[in-house]
Each structure stands twice: as structure tokens, then as C-alpha cells.
């Protein structure tokens, strides 16, 4: 059997080939008509997926040239998952490029502004500088890790504990940090937060990343869901 990350196998797992495509519909990956061959015909050598083949994603039903999806997948970190470029639905388990490190959790009785009826969960992320791997923007080059350990806070109530469990899933899938350019400092080749916001201040809010913030837990649940991390992940 083909390895789960074999690019052609991944494309065929999540797309069903469709015939008789409407002539005027575009493939949003290559911007060519679906009725014409894939714009990636020359860039992609593939024995089993032909440039004129069109496929439909199994859940969201969006259609693309199958060769275009293959090119998109091959250009990513090839973790066996696909994300629909149209509606962002995730197929399989999305993983990121967070460098190696450690996530530590503890609790203390002091409460957070806006959550006066419970104690606090503290998460500490440790990541050290290192050398970029093939999944990073500049493989072989060093990356820096500024401001670590980074301390983050959640209310120690039911919703906060649920967020914590989902953050652990996100950490294990390497989704919390990435290597890139910092918006705050402009430094490149450095470890930065990815798309999941954390509260790094508890009793001040000088950075805007503190408490009180009545919408925070719902917002971070939505950000986790956008990365494919939902309550379903906790039931398995
Ligand atoms: P970034 O500036 O590239 O931003 C990425 C995401 O992190 C954005 O969504 C942003 O809203 C969020 N973010 C920005 N500042 C944050 C903060 N203080 N707490 C929580 N989230 C924050 O991300 P980055 O380069 O990882 O830097 C973010 C923060 O990391 C800085 O503001 C700073 O607190 C810390 N940092 C410290 C040093 C240091 O030398 N002590 C150096 C770099 C960054
Ligand atoms: Zn296409
Ligand atoms: Zn879709």
C-alpha cells in the first residue's frame, strides 16, 4: 500500500474525479477553466493524474484540477492533510512547522480580571534557537527564539480547561508557533506565534494580549477550529 503521505494517494483520497465539468467554471488554483487542462501541466510530472482530470473534494464539494491540488500539496509540508483553497475545510490532520520545544502547564489560585470566580492556568512554552529543517522558509539556516520562555494564562474553569486540552493537541500538531518574520520586531528567521492567539499578560493589558477580554475563549476556540483542532479531537 502507498504511504499515507504519497502525494498522488492523498489527492485521490480526498477528491472524487468528476466528468462533464461546466465549461465556464474556473479552477481557483491555476485560474484556468476547469474544462481546459491544468495550468500546472508542465510543472508537475505525474503518471496517474492527467492535466484534464477534475476532482471534487468529498465534504465541501469544491472542484479543482486534480493536478493543481497535487501541485498545491507538494508545495506544502506534505503531512497527509489537504485544506480546500476555497473554503478552508481541512481533510485529514493538519500539522504545522513549530520547532521542537516544551509546553508546561500549572495552576495557581489567583484569579484573572473578568474571571474572578476561579483560579488561573499558566502555560509556559520553551523553545530554543536552532537550525531550520526542510519544512521551514530557509532550510539549513539558523533561527532565533526571542522572549522564551513565553508565559500564557487561561481561567481555570470548564471552558478554560477545554481550551487548554485543545492547545495541547495544537502543540502536538506543531501549530502554536512557526518560523518566519515577526510582525512586532521585523526580524526574519525567528520563532513567531502562529494563528492561535494567547494571553501573555494577566493583571495588566499593555500589549492588548491580556485580561479582561470577554470574547477571548470563544475567539481562540474559533482559531483552533480553523486549524482543524475541535472537541472531536478530544473524544478519540
Ligand atoms: P508577531 O509579532 O509576529 O505576531 C504574531 C501574532 O502574535 C499576532 O497575531 C500578534 O497579534 C500576536 N502577538 C503579538 N504580540 C503578542 C504578545 N505580547 N502576546 C501574545 N500575542 C502577541 O509574533 P512574535 O514575533 O512571536 O512576537 C510577539 C511577542 O513576543 C512580542 O510582543 C513580545 O511579547 C514577545 N517577544 C519578545 C522578545 C524579547 O526579546 N523579549 C522578542 C520578540 C518577541
Ligand atoms: Zn487548476
Ligand atoms: Zn471547499
Image: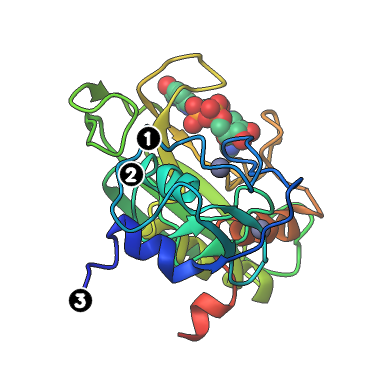
Tell me: is circle 1 under 8 Å from ligand 1: no
Q: Is residue 43 above or below residue 101?
A: above
**Which tag, 1 or 2, sits closer to the chain's start?**
2
* Quadrant of the displayed image that contains ligand 3: bottom right
Could you tell me how far apart the alpha carbons at marks 1 and 3 are, in whole angstroms? 43 Å
The answer to whether any part of residue 108 appears in the image is no
Contact (CB < 8 A) between labels 1 and 2?
yes
Can residue 207 be seen by looking at this rendering?
yes
The residue carrying pointer 1 sits among few (fewer than 14), some (14 to 19) or many (20 or more) residues within 10 Å by Cα, namely few
Mark 3 Cα shell of 10 Å, populated few (<14), some (14-19), many (≥20):
few
Q: Which residue is mark 3?
A: 1
What is the quadrant of the N terminus in the image? bottom left
Q: Secondary structure at mark 3?
A: loop
* Residue 6 in picture, x, y percent from top left: 27, 59
Label located before the other in sequence (2 or 3): 3
Quadrant of the rendered image containing residue 84: bottom right
Q: Residues within 10 Å of mark 2 (few under 14, many from 20)?
A: some
Give 199 or 83, whichever is nearer the viewer: 83
Q: What residue appears at the point 61 percent right and 47 percent down from the top-left corner?
A: 85
For label 1, the residue is: 148
Task: Indicate which disc residue 126 carries.
Answer: 2
Amino acid at each position: 500500500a502507498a504511504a499515507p503521505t504519497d502525494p498522488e494517494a492523498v489527492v485521490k483520497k480526498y477528491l472524487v474525479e468528476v466528468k462533464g465539468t461546466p465549461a465556464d467554471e474556473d479552477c481557483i488554483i491555476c485560474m484556468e477553466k476547469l474544462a481546459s487542462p491544468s495550468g500546472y501541466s508542465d510543472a508537475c510530472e505525474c503518471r496517474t493524474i492527467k492535466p484534464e482530470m477534475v476532482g471534487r473534494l468529498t465534504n465541501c464539494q469544491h472542484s479543482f484540477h486534480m493536478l493543481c491540488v497535487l501541485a498545491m500539496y507538494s508545495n506544502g509540508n506534505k503531512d497527509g492533510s489537504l485544506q480546500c483553497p476555497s473554503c478552508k475545510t481541512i481533510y485529514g490532520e493538519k500539522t504545522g512547522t513549530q520547532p521542537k520545544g516544551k509546553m508546561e502547564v500549572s495552576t495557581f489560585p489567583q484569579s484573572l480580571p473578568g474571571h474572578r470566580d476561579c483560579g488561573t492556568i499558566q502555560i509556559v512554552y520553551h523553545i530554543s534557537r536552532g537550525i531550520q529543517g526542510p519544512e521551514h522558509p530557509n532550510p539549513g539556516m539558523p533561527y532565533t527564539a526571542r522572549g522564551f520562555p513565553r508565559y500564557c494564562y487561561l481561567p481555570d474553569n470548564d471552558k478554560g480547561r477545554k481550551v487548554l486540552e485543545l492547545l495541547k493537541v495544537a502543540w502536538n500538531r506543531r501549530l502554536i508557533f512557526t518560523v518566519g518574520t515577526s510582525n512586532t520586531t521585523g526580524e526574519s528567521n525567528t520563532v513567531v506565534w502562529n494563528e492561535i492567539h494567547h494571553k501573555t499578560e494577566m493583571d495588566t493589558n499593555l500589549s492588548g494580549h491580556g485580561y479582561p477580554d470577554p470574547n477571548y475563549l470563544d475567539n481562540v476556540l474559533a482559531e483552533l477550529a480553523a486549524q482543524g483542532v475541535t472537541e472531536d479531537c478530544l473524544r478519540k
